[in-house]
Each structure stands twice: as C-alpha cells, then as structure tokens.
Amino acid sequence: MALYYCKKCGRIAQENYTQDKQICDCCDSIMLPVPKKYLLDGYDIVLKSDDTEQLLIEELVKSSPEFDQYLFDNRDEILSNKSSDLNIKLSHGKAVMEGRDKGNSYGVTCPYCKATNLRKIGIVSRSVSASIFGLGSKKIGKQWHCDHCGSDF
C-alpha cells in the first residue's frame, strides 16, 4: 500500500489496486505517490502530521501548474455528488435486472415486488376466467397483472 496525491485538486488517498494508474476519484487526474519526506518513518500510508499534509499541499499541489482552486475548494462536495450519482446508477441497474424499470402510463406499481411493468386485466379476461372457474376465479375484483412476478391485484 502507498499514499498518493492529486496535483489538480489536492486529494490524498491510498492506492487503488483495481487500476493500473492511480486515478483521482474527484477530478479523474493521475495521482502521484507521496514522497517519503512527508511520510512517517517506516510507513508508506501515514503522513508525519497534519502540518505535514499542509506542507505537502503548499509545496506539491498549490505550486503545480495543474492546480485548480475550484476543485480544491469544492472537493468534498464533488465527491459527495459522485457518490450520489453512483447510488442512483446502481439502483437503476438493480431495477433493470429485476424488471422494475419498464414503467407504465398509469403510475401504478406492484404491491408485492414494486415493479412498474404492469398491464390492466381486461373485462374479457375477467369474464373468461369467471366463466371457467366461477366464483373461484383469481381475477374477480382484480384490475392489474404484474408481468414481473405474475401476481394479480
């Protein structure tokens, strides 16, 4: 493990083993390893102190031609927004996998699986079911059929 810093936004983070290059999760710039002079002796991931972090920012980040004051000042907000966007994308992906993303023009969702890919049970379908099964028909008193879980409600 090692500690990396971003010259553009000033983010300091541990390395990400899923990437060949260390990419800043805030501004997508390439991150560089923190030089040993800023690290606690014998450690690759611990800065000497809070003052050392300020010194690193002043000497390596703010003096860099790539430095962006806006990104530096709004780094926490940017990371928070990226996290929210990721959660939205993940929940949409889950809805796609579960078949709940289809939507309908009625604004109705299945009470059992929360899917929106529904269709109305027509009068003909209810009549045929009632004529075959009589009062035991599952479609009597039901208006909707869920194409995801197959329930009628």
Image (cartoon, rainbow, N blue to C red):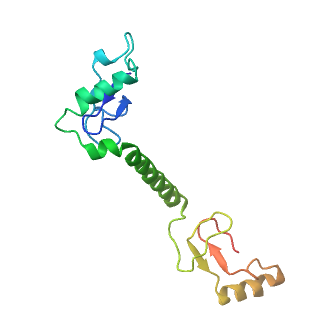
Q: Is residue 27 in sight in this rendering?
A: no
Q: Position of residue 99 (x, y in %)?
A: 53, 63
Q: Residue at x 33, y 27 (%)?
A: 54
Q: Residue furthest top?
A: 42
Q: How many tags in the picture?
A: 0
Q: Residue at x 64, y 86 (%)?
A: 122
Looking at this view, is 147 or 24 the one in front?
Answer: 24
Relative horizontal placement of residue 110, taking residue 3 as reference (left or right): right
Q: Position of residue 8 (x, y in %)?
A: 25, 38
Relative to 91, say whether 49 is above or below: above
Q: Position of residue 123 (x, y in %)?
A: 67, 89
Looking at this view, is 31 or 89 the one in front?
Answer: 31
Relative to 144, say whether 75 is above or below: above
Q: Is residue 56 in sight in this rendering?
A: yes
Quarter holding residue 89? bottom left
Relative to 148, say whether 139 is above or below: below
Looking at this view, is 45 or 143 the one in front?
Answer: 45
Quadrant occupied by the N terminus: top left
Q: Residue furthest right?
A: 135
Relative horizontal placement of residue 67, taking residue 144 as reference (left or right): left
Quadrant occupied by the C terminus: bottom right
Looking at this view, is 72 or 135 the one in front?
Answer: 72
Q: Residue furthest left?
A: 65
Relative horizontal placement of residue 51, taking residue 118 as reference (left or right): left
